[in-house]
Image: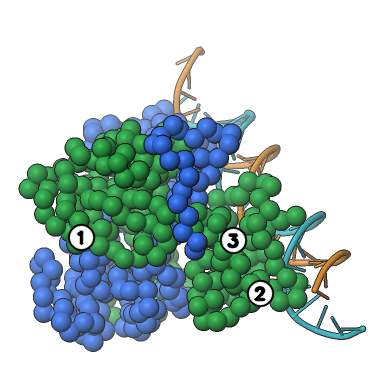
Chain colours: A blue, B green, C orange, D cyan
Amino acid sequence: MSAARKRTPLSVIRRLPDYLSLVQDLRKAGIPWVSSHVIAMRLGFTSSTVRQDLTYLDFSGSSKFGYSTDSLGKALCAKLGADARWTMIVIGAGNLGRALALYEGFRRRGFRIRAIFDSDPAKTGSRVGRFTVRHVSEMPAAVRRFRVDVGIIAVPEASAQEVADILVLAGVRGLLNLAPTRVVTPAGVPVIDSRVVASLLELSYAITETGLPGRRSRPRHDEPLRRKKGC
Amino acid sequence: MSAARKRTPLSVIRRLPDYLSLVQDLRKAGIPWVSSHVIAMRLGFTSSTVRQDLTYLDFSGSSKFGYSTDSLGKALCAKLGADARWTMIVIGAGNLGRALALYEGFRRRGFRIRAIFDSDPAKTGSRVGRFTVRHVSEMPAAVRRFRVDVGIIAVPEASAQEVADILVLAGVRGLLNLAPTRVVTPAGVPVIDSRVVASLLELSYAITETGLPGRRSRPRHDEPLRRKKGC
DNA sequence: TAGATTGTTAATCGATTAACAATC
DNA sequence: TAGATTGTTAATCGATTAACAATC
């Protein structure tokens, strides 16, 4: 039996959204079956990894046709909680916070933003799409009233932890942190850090690395050396 | 000798930005030395992991005082390429693209945005902070003129790959992809996917998971069941 | 049937942690 | 010196991959 007996490793959970996205594309394209081999090719995994991963779902493939894109999609949704509706609020009505509040893509996955907050009285009352920016002091009450599941932190680095504490106290169940710093929460309240700046540093390393001897750096431009900054 | 003999695993590279951030905070706070144990506590790693990781830097600690925050910071910067200046452009002048173009935090790490582009003629010519939005058709020329290192993709899912191809062809050295889809590049051009939507799914799983038997879900609200969506 | 594919076990690989001698 | 800390080797742990019997 393939279902969720053993606990699902985080490494597997992180690949699941990729399977979901692919399988939904295939289903929309009218493709009813897909093999572990094809999935592997498309996502850059091995077919072994694919078959192992899908073992953690309440779902089975067919040794004749492979996996049904339709039922695999449903099983992935169920596993990931993507078949639920999640209520979110955004804290911080700066450029990033506003962009998040206006982003349509969350909706499609069941993530719905209900309100946006800022600590700056000059911003409260202003409009962001269909929202009116409210003052953070109203936030705890709103978390309870809207039964908010997820708080999205889009405030400056310096206030990220403070905002996280207030959100947790108000009863939020998870955090998505977009501030360029880690945020700590009590066990039981998961937090995901977006790490965009950290990602850029990883990219920066990768660029420097691939430009090293061995792999020839691609011919480009006319200035081979980076301007140094000092750090 | 501790220097970069063996290749540095990606798992290590991904922790390096955390060390850098911590160590720079400490240095600014006037703390000149830090031990692997303290670093581990602050970042949630083990001291073994910390010592192992720092092994990949051109740098050594002192068995008397631990690590000098100053020289550790410098070694991390050098390793990550954070001591270089990187030139970036943003493709997509929607809410997200504009937020990125206006974000101050990149600068501090040596990442500098030089221009922003959009395919919508209605947007070209409009202002985003100190930038004028330009048409994507001008992008390849700008990549060469400004010697752009990194292209930031902030366009809708459907055009992400196309934009990536153009950027690579124009000579960009790496990509940061914020569209909610994977983007493929030839070997030698690293790409980092931001995976914000995938992260939300991971969070969604974590929330559902921690609410399971065993760990008592924290008492909250009065509605225990998620509204189902169907998927 | 013959051939392709899954589900699963075992082998490999890599990353994390523990332990400890060397250093200051 | 005594004690704390690093650097490094060895042990453990977990994740990925290979292999293959079972299935359709």
Q: Is residue B182 left or right of residue A127?
A: right
Q: Quadrant of residue A159?
A: bottom left
**Pointers 3 and 2 within a single chain:** yes
Q: Residue at x 61, y 78 (%)?
A: B32
Percent from the top left, x then y, of residue B100?
27, 59
**Which of marks 2 and 3 precedes in the sequence?**
2
Task: For marks 2 and 1, give the one nearer the viewer.
Answer: 1
> What kind of element bears circle 3?
helix
Which quadrant of the structure image shows residue A78? bottom left
Q: Which residue is mark 1?
A: B130
Q: Chain of mark 2?
A: B
Sequence-wise first label, 2 or 1? 2
Chain label for disc 1: B
* Residue type (three-letter) at the residue carrying disc 1: Arg
SS of the residue at dot 1?
loop
- Residue B19 horizontal/vertical position (percent): 55, 66
How far is disc 1 from disc 3 in space, using C-alphas? 34 Å
Image point (63%, 46%), residue name:
B7
Which sits in the foreground, A216 or A203? Answer: A216
Q: Give how far across and how far down residue B181 sits, in percent.
A: 31, 45
Q: What amino acid type is highlighted by mark number 2? A: Ser
- Front: mark 3 or 2: 3
The residue at which mark 3 appears reads as B75
Q: Chain of mark 3?
A: B
In this view, B203 is above or below B182: below
Disc on the earlier residue, 1 or 3: 3
Amino acid found under the numbered disc labelled 3: Ala
Tell me the CA gap for discs 2 and 1.
43 Å
Q: Secondary structure at mark 2?
A: loop
Residue identifier under label 2: B35
Q: Residues within 10 Å of mark 1 (few under 14, many from 20)?
A: few
